[in-house]
Image (cartoon, rainbow, N blue to C red):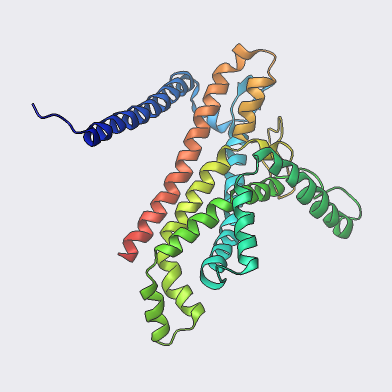
Amino acid sequence: MTRLTPHQRANFAFGAFSGSAALVIVAVLAFIVWDVLSLGLPQMSWEFVSAPPRDGMTAGGIFPAIFGTVLLVLIMTAAVIPVGVVTAVFLFEYARPDAFFARAVRSAVYNLAGVPSIVFGLFGVGFFIQFVGGNLDRLFSDGRVVWGQPAILWAALTLAVLTLPVVIVATEEALRAVPREHREAALALGSTRFEALWRVVLPQAVPGILTGAILAVARGAGETAPILFTGAAYFLPHLPTSGHDQFMHLGYHVYVLATQSPDIEATKPILYGTVLVLLLVTVILNLVAIGLRSRLRKRRS
């Protein structure tokens, strides 16, 4: 029998330790999924996903929360992707790495990623609702409160600020993955720097940019703290019809059912059904983005 060297024993021990850690993570995830499925599936029905809540949210469905969550994520994505991509392009393609402004922006991005989500909610109240919305009301609404109140638009923009570092970092990595030779070849053929970026670099970086969008959707769909103050409603059976309307949200609905219900046992099936729907909505939104990314990759290959 061959004796293992100390180096081989160390490799084997570390492999066993890391494999055990990975197994624990998979087991925890499997237990969470099994718990949600076992208690949430019996609640699933067409009425549950298509009807508004009623009887103090102990009966009916959660369609307004589903609609509000999807609309919120779509507005957030439409707001964060352009800003994040343009910022990443500036940092990687145009700014000198040692420039003071570039270093300040990059430092701000990294620090922004570490800010607690509840702080973003307070920022949304102070900046979007009181400052932006309040000034819009003074200018265009004759003093009436239209925009200076919690609304789906302000909640989406708050989440856009929260997920901005994810998109910037993912876009930078996607730009870094494009070979420099492609840029040089485009410039050598007479393209301007912008034309090389628009026609050569960005098309190759789109799959990586969509990866950032997927990560942003995954985080934004599940965030509850930032929207507590900026637009989510406790009980709102009708759908939002404009940007200054409040909305119901699956994550906030789960929080309300778990902490504010006078009869926890009565709302427990609805609670687990809502959690299951939130997971499904997040997975579906991610699958749509992943499918679009795969399709673009096939076109480029």
Q: Is residue 192 above or below residue 237?
A: below
Q: In this view, does 82 lie to the left or right of 184?
A: right
Tell me what residue is drawn at x 48 percent, y 55 percent: 170
Residue sitting at the far left: 1
Q: 88 or 141, which lies in front?
A: 88
Q: Where is residue 292 in the image (x, y as percent from the top left)?
A: 41, 55
Tell me what residue is drawn at x 71 percent, y 30 percent: 234
Q: In this view, does 8 lie to the left or right of 91?
A: left
Q: Is residue 182 above or below residue 294?
A: below
Residue sitting at the far right: 143
Q: Position of residue 224 (x, y in %)?
A: 63, 35
Q: How many marks?
A: 0
Q: Where is residue 247 in the image (x, y as percent from the top left)?
A: 68, 39
Q: 176 or 45, which lies in front?
A: 176
Residue sitting at the far front: 6
Does any portion of residue 47 appear in the rendered image?
Answer: no
Q: Position of residue 238 (x, y in %)?
A: 68, 36
Q: In this view, does 163 lie above or below 1?
A: below
- The quarter of the picture where the N terminus appears is top left
Does any portion of residue 115 appear in the rendered image?
Answer: yes
Q: Is residue 204 left or right of residue 74?
A: left
Tell me what residue is drawn at x 65 percent, y 40 percent: 117
